[in-house]
Image (cartoon, grey):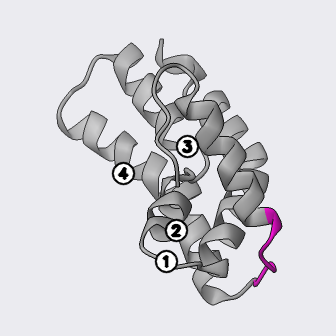
Amino acid sequence: MTHVDGPGRGGAGLFLTGLIVSAQKLRFGPSVGIQTLLSNVAHPLIAAALALLFAVPALIAREAIVLAALPAGFFGILFGLRFGIKSEVVGTTLIASTIVSAVTLAAAIYLTAGMV
């Protein structure tokens, strides 16, 4: 793996992730379902609970909740590749999380709209 500096890092990481995921078979199973639910549902709920617990200002709380509702990131795939681990579960979770986020992210935005 080559080292990339500058503003192209994010784009290069996403491109590399796409190459890796496209070469893998999708394997849906309980592990993928659990990871997707944790990423798309549990994270925003935990962010909301922490914002409530610590009395975070409404705008910051909304931003935290919506950001927590974003789909799973690509870092796990690149980190695993660095150590020679190619997990089809991680790639499938990334795709499932992105698809499910069409609903969960929209729900997070809608449900937090009155916070501001």
Q: Disc 4 marks which amino acid?
A: Ile
- Of all residues, the one furthest to the bottom in this rendering is 29
| In-front residue for pair 66/25 | 25
Q: Earlier in the sequence, mark 1 or mark 3?
A: 3
Estimate the spatial distance between the alpha carbons at disc 4 and disc 3, rounded to whole Å: 10 Å
> Hey, which residue is sitting farthest left in the picture?
54
Marks 4 and 2: which is nearer the front?
2
**N-terminal label among 4 and 2:** 4
Please determine whether, in this image, residue 32 is positioned above or below residue 101: below
Q: Is residue 108 left or right of residue 103?
A: left
The residue identified by callout 1 is 84
The picture quadrant where one finds residue 57 is top left
Residue 97: x and y in percent read 67, 58
Is 13 on the left or on the right of 85, as rendered? Answer: right
- Image coordinates of residue 75 in percent, x first then y, are 49, 53
Q: Which mark is residue 69?
A: 3
Cβ atoms under marks 4 and 2 closer than 8 Å: no
Tell whether label 1 touches label 4 (CB within 8 Å).
no
